Amino acid sequence: PFGIQNVYGQIDNNWMSLWGEVGTFGLLAWGAILGAIVRMCLFIRRRTHGMFEIALAEGVAGLTVGVAVIGFFGPYFEFRSLMFYFWTLIGILTLVWYRERGAFNFLTTSN
């Protein structure tokens, strides 16, 4: 909705919009969240032996870097269809990360 998209191209990007909305510390926190996601993916990649988990971790790491880069070129963080799948995959990877860390598995009834 911002910029002059239909005439001269799109001038809005997510990073400037986040900076304006949440300030410098919020922008740094958002970058730290994306960095933590990539670190979680790399941890899963090193620790697991399942091919599905390895492929998912590598794919989400690349997707996270791609989403961060493409955020410079448009308001892609705001697309509900893209972000729903992005955060769903991260949620699945978080469960794998908990399992690989040996943390409590809340999906089972035993403690």
Image (cartoon, grey):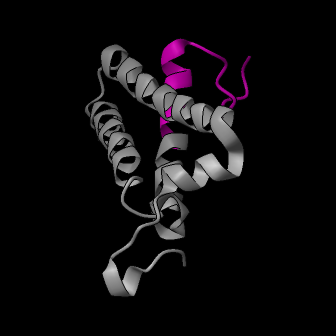
Q: Is residue 32 above or below residue 10?
A: above
What is the tally of numbered marks visible in this picture?
Answer: 0
Q: Residue at x 34, y 40 (%)?
A: 65
Residue 109, image x and y in percent?
A: 73, 28
Which one is nearer the viewer's eye here, 92 or 79?
A: 79
Q: Is residue 54 magenta?
A: no
* Quarter of the figure with residue 42: top left
Q: Is residue 98 magenta?
A: yes
Q: Residue at x 32, y 22 (%)?
A: 45
The quarter in which the C terminus is drawn is: top right
Residue 39, image x and y in percent?
A: 43, 22
Q: Is residue 34 above or below residue 78?
A: above
Residue 44, image x and y in percent?
A: 39, 22
Q: Residue at x 45, y 62 (%)?
A: 76
- Does 109 sit left or right of 91 as displayed? right
Residue 41, image x and y in percent?
A: 39, 28
Would residue 101 be visible to someone looking at this image?
yes
Q: Residue at x 46, y 24 (%)?
A: 40
The quarter in which the N terminus is drawn is: bottom right
Which one is nearer the viewer's eye here, 34 or 20?
A: 20
The stretch of residues the image draws in magenta is: 92-111
- Does 13 sit left or right of 6 as displayed? right
Which one is nearer the viewer's eye here, 1 or 32?
A: 1
